[in-house]
Image (tube, grey):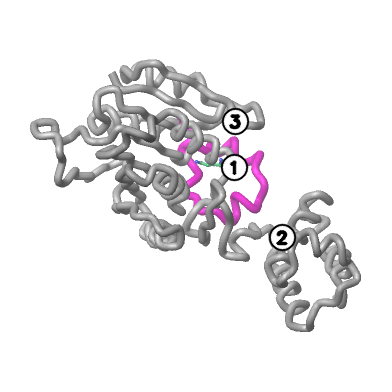
Amino acid sequence: MKTIKDVFTVFKRRLGDVYDANETEALTLLVVNEISDLSKAQIKAFPEKEITVGQAESLNRIVIRLQTGEPVQYILGHTEFYGLPFKVNPSVLIPRPETEELVEWVLTSVDSSSLTDYNILDIGTGSGCIAISLKKNLPNASVSAIDISIGALETAKQNADLNKVKVDFIQDDILNSKFKIQNSKISGENNQRFEVIISNPPYVTLYDKTQMHNNVTDFEPHSALFVPEDDPLIFYKAIADFALTHLTASGLLFLEINESLGNETVELLQAKGFNSIELRKDMSGRDRMIRGIRF
Ligand code: GLN
């Protein structure tokens, strides 16, 4: 590999079994951009430009990992979410574009001018992408986030520092929550604190797994993805119960959902007593998110 053009040829040949031609092209562009000081436009415009021996070695190491199906975001160690940088590693799910749409829904649902004393909780924060992008865009809100995984919480803390925001990260298992609210401002009602609770919990069933690309199932954390086939809404039940006791009256619950379980998840929230439940599709036209209001 002596020129940029050679890199594209080699990547195309070596990644042909793992990715289609468009994905390979996009990945190659991303990786060359990462290891050089060239913009994507320059990489496209100057295919004859020579790369250094060191760059060729880096590219070779990267393409070997890409051939195994390892996601490029883990190889590079970072990605973007809602226009912000995030570190990622195998203890956190790689942020998805659908989840950006959920964040957008929160931001358009709350009145940002009246957010002093406003409290938001993200359940199962992973990389921290939801909590951090909300805090970045709602600087007057207090944002807390829980996760069962210590590795995820460490990554999320690094991401809060990277994005220069303050988020309160707490270790907790929502299926067996020990979450205690401290310093509650609402006397007598000290278990109701959040105006917004949001979650993108695990929702992938074993059946869904058979339909997924191996770069998700072989590399991303199973605890962030999979649910038992016989109880796919296990996290939604726990989150809804938690939200009933931890949302303020008229507080909002936002959930990312399994596209095949839209109606079931709406019915679950109805049965728990949430009001004004709205199911929304993502940019691919799939049922992907729900908003409900606590009675
Ligand atoms: N949307 C993710 C995927 O399809 C799953 C995220 C989740 O389980 N919360 O890989």
Residue under pointer 3: 282
Count residues near mark 3 (Cα–Cα under 10 Å), then give few for <14, some for 14-19, many for 20+: some
Residue 166's spot in the image, x, y percent? 34, 55
Q: Earlier in the sequence, mark 1 or mark 3?
A: 1
Using the numbered discs, state the Cα–Cα distance from disc 1 to disc 3 in whole angstroms: 9 Å
Question: In the displayed structure, does residue 44 sit left or right of residue 185?
Answer: right
Q: Residue at x 55, y 30 (%)?
A: 288
When asked about the image quadrant of residue 237, the answer is: top left
Identify whether 213 is placed above or below 189: below
Image quarter for ligand 1 equals top right
Amino acid type indicated by mark 2: Leu
Nearest the eye: 232 or 270 = 270
Question: In the displayed structure, does residue 65 sit left or right of residue 275?
Answer: right
Q: Earlier in the sequence, mark 2 or mark 1?
A: 2
Q: Which mark is residue 30?
A: 2
Q: Residue at x 14, y 34 (%)?
A: 186
Residue under pointer 1: 97
Marks 3 and 1: in contact by CB < 8 Å?
no
Q: How many marks?
A: 3
When asked about the image quadrant of residue 138, the answer is: top left
Marks 1 and 2: in contact by CB < 8 Å?
no
Q: Is residue 210 magenta?
A: yes
- Asked whether residue 231 is in view, the answer is no
What span is in magenta?
Answer: 203-232
- Asked whether residue 21 is in view, the answer is yes
Nearest the eye: 159 or 116 = 116
Q: Is residue 179 magenta?
A: no
Nearest the eye: 215 or 194 = 194
Identify whether 126 is placed above or below 75: above
